[in-house]
Image (cartoon, rainbow, N blue to C red):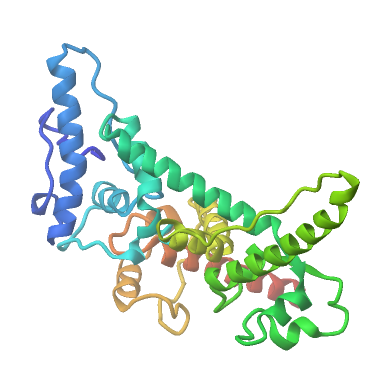
């Protein structure tokens, strides 16, 4: 099962080569899940609880451990299993920089993480990341000003920003950071420069108005992102559009489980260039009738299945258009 408890012997949890994997990391990953569930089951039994402990299971969208175990349980394996990032359909979201944010809260929920200092640290980091991303969304400049302030590097639009008709167009710091080669450090520097100028103007105005006994709010200047949040803030913004597209692809894929695959489909690299030789051989040999059947073939990655789905949809659309034009 997904808890790594054997179906034939209740209370026996296994992990490692006996489950079909090879490698220390794969064995260690299974040990975490098997050990957590075995411990929870033992505690429940010791307390005399009649109901079984709530199973601790990681989903495919929560971690590579979830991908590994789901593959073993639902697909099985004909050869020693290794964990590759290509096996995960949500790999853009499964990054090292956000592992603590993804998994610590789940650990707390299942009483696996009890260190108050660790929990507080993760919550503080999450708050800092959210606050900085929100600041990037709110801070806006005219595109021409972004280009002028980045004249030395020229990666924030360059000449394209100065095209006629773009003078009145504004972009947020988040949108600028999403551009290729733009770093969070460069964006924050411009933000701090602008805030410094605004603060100096406000201080000068406040001094002039002091004689009139009026109070003026002095804007503050942000500080650069801390090392503990820098990578996650940058990755969150950089990968935002890709994560959205990733979820759309997987949603369309889930709805397509019952869609039939044409029996005459040719599984060759010229038609399916992103597929590995192994994937093409397996598909040609099994020739699944539906995408649900294709998803059960060991070694076929979710991303390849999504590509296959789009290929079949495009093929069907072209066929329908040809039939309509001939009629």
The residue under the point 54% across, 79% down is: 181
Q: Between residue 207 and residue 165, name the one nearer to us.
A: 207
- The quarter of the picture where residue 145 lies is bottom right
Q: Kindly give the residue lying farthest to the right in the view shown.
A: 212
Residue drawn at point x = 22 percent, y = 53 percent: 76
Q: Is residue 290 visible?
A: no
Residue 184 drawn at (x, y percent): 54, 68
Choose between 117 and 31: the one closer to the eye. Answer: 117
Assign the C terminus to one quadrant of the image. Answer: bottom right
Q: Position of residue 63 (x, y in %)?
A: 34, 51
Tell me: residue 112, above or below residue 23: above
Residue reaching furthest to the front:
211
The part of the image, by quadrant, that contains residue 94 is: bottom left
Could you say where residue 156 lies in the image, as x and y percent from the top left? 65, 79
Q: Quadrant of residue 36?
A: top left
Q: Is residue 130 visible?
A: yes
- The quadrant of the picture occupied by the N terminus is top left
Query: How many numbered discs, if any?
Result: 0
Of residues 276 and 293, which is closer to you in this image? 276
209 or 239, which lies in front? 209
Give the x, y percent position of residue 125: 44, 48
């Amino acid at each position: 099962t997904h808890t790594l408890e054997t179906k034939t012997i209740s209370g026996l949890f296994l992990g490692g080569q006996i489950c079909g994997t090879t490698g220390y990391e794969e064995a260690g990953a299974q040990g975490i899940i098997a050990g957590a569930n075995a411990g929870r089951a033992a505690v429940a039994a010791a307390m005399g609880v009649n109901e079984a402990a709530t199973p601790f299971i990681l989903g495919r969208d929560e971690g590579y451990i979830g991908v590994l175990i789901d593959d073993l349980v639902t697909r099985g394996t004909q050869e020693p299993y290794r964990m590759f990032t290509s096996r995960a359909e949500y790999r853009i979201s499964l990054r090292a920089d956000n592992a603590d944010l993804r998994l610590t809260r789940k650990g707390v929920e299942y009483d696996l993480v009890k260190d108050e200092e660790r929990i507080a640290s993760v919550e503080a980091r999450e708050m800092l990341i959210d606050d900085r991303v929100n600041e990037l969304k709110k801070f806006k400049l005219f595109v021409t000003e972004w280009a002028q302030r980045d004249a030395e590097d020229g990666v924030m639009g360059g000449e394209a920003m100065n095209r006629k008709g773009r003078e009145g167009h504004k972009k947020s710091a988040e949108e600028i950071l999403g551009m290729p080669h733009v770093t969070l450090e460069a964006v924050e520097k411009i933000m701090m420069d602008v805030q410094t100028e605004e603060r100096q103007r406000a201080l000068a105005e406040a001094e002039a108005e002091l004689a009139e006994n009026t109070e003026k709010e002095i804007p503050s200047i942000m500080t650069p992102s801390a090392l503990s949040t820098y990578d996650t803030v940058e990755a969150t913004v950089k990968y935002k559009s890709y994560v959205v597209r990733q979820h759309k692809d997987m949603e369309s894929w889930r709805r397509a489980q019952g869609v039939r695959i044409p029996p005459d489909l040719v599984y060759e690299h010229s038609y399916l260039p992103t597929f590995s030789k192994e994937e093409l051989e397996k598909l040609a040999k099994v020739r699944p009738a539906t995408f649900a059947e294709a998803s059960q073939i060991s070694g076929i990655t979710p991303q390849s299945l999504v590509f296959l789905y789009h290929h079949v949809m495009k093929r069907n659309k072209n066929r329908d258009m040809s039939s309509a034009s001939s009629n």
